[in-house]
Image (cartoon, helix red, strand yellow):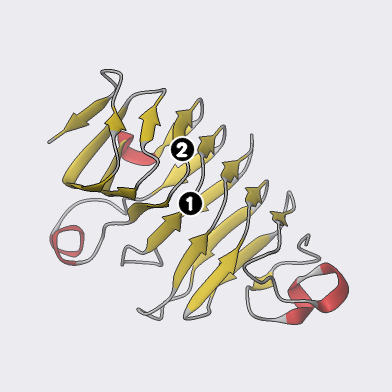
Amino acid sequence: INSATSGNWNDPATWVGGVVPRSVDDVHIVNGQSVVVNANIARCQNLSVSGTLSYSTTTTHLLHIFGNLSINVGGAFNAFNATSGRRVYLGGNFTNAGTANFDVGTGVAFVATGVGTLFWVGGEPATFTNTGTITNGRIPHIYHANSGGVTYMNAVSISRYVGLHNGVVNPNGMLTVG
């Protein structure tokens, strides 16, 4: 399902064919368009971002990608709203050639709520590949709950919390915590 225009995730007018994506659908945010996750739980199979994906200001919204997340050249993925971090649950590979932003900055808001989370889930081996930009050079929270394991192909810094809950994590010397 491709985005037809900028708009909210749960608005049929945002999508070609007027169909809101479901957990079995592959989704593409088209270049030049901005989609806002405004559903309590937005779901899709695979997500390709050539435009911009961000979250609404409501605190309960999250995104569950059962397959792969691909942020293409020129694409932007913002795992926060204006001031608060959000979770993305990912069951497949993370591939970033654009801009991934999990970190809204520093200060009081940063300490309280200003962090996004990458939460690896599922049972198939997954990889982290980054040839693009990770804003501020870090992902504040990463949880590993993928029984198939996660392999890091490029460097990433985890600034606040790393959780090792299930599966093997192969950092390849690419993870920095602190």
Residue occupying image coordinates x 66% and y 72%: 22
> Badge 1 is on which residue?
91
- Residue 63: image x %, image y %? 48, 65
Q: Is residue 79 visible?
A: no
Farthest residue, direction top: 173
Q: Which quarter of the rendering shows the C terminus?
A: top left
Q: Is residue 74 left or right of residue 40?
A: right
Alpha-carbon span between mark 1 and mark 2: 8 Å
Give the mark, 1 or 2, whose residue is nearer the N terminus.
1
Asked which quadrant contains residue 173, the reply is top left
Crowdedness near tag 2: few (<14), some (14–19) or many (≥20) residues, C-alpha within 10 Å: many
Residue on which the image places disc 2: 126
In percent of width and height, residue 147 lies at 35, 46
Q: Is residue 107 left or right of residue 76?
A: left
Residues at discs 1 and 2 in contact (Cβ within 8 Å): yes
Q: Is residue 110 visible?
A: yes
Mark 1 belongs to which amino acid?
Gly
Residue 60 placement, left or right of 158:
right
Which amino acid, mark 2?
A: Ala
Query: The residue tagged with tag 1: helix, strand or loop?
Result: loop
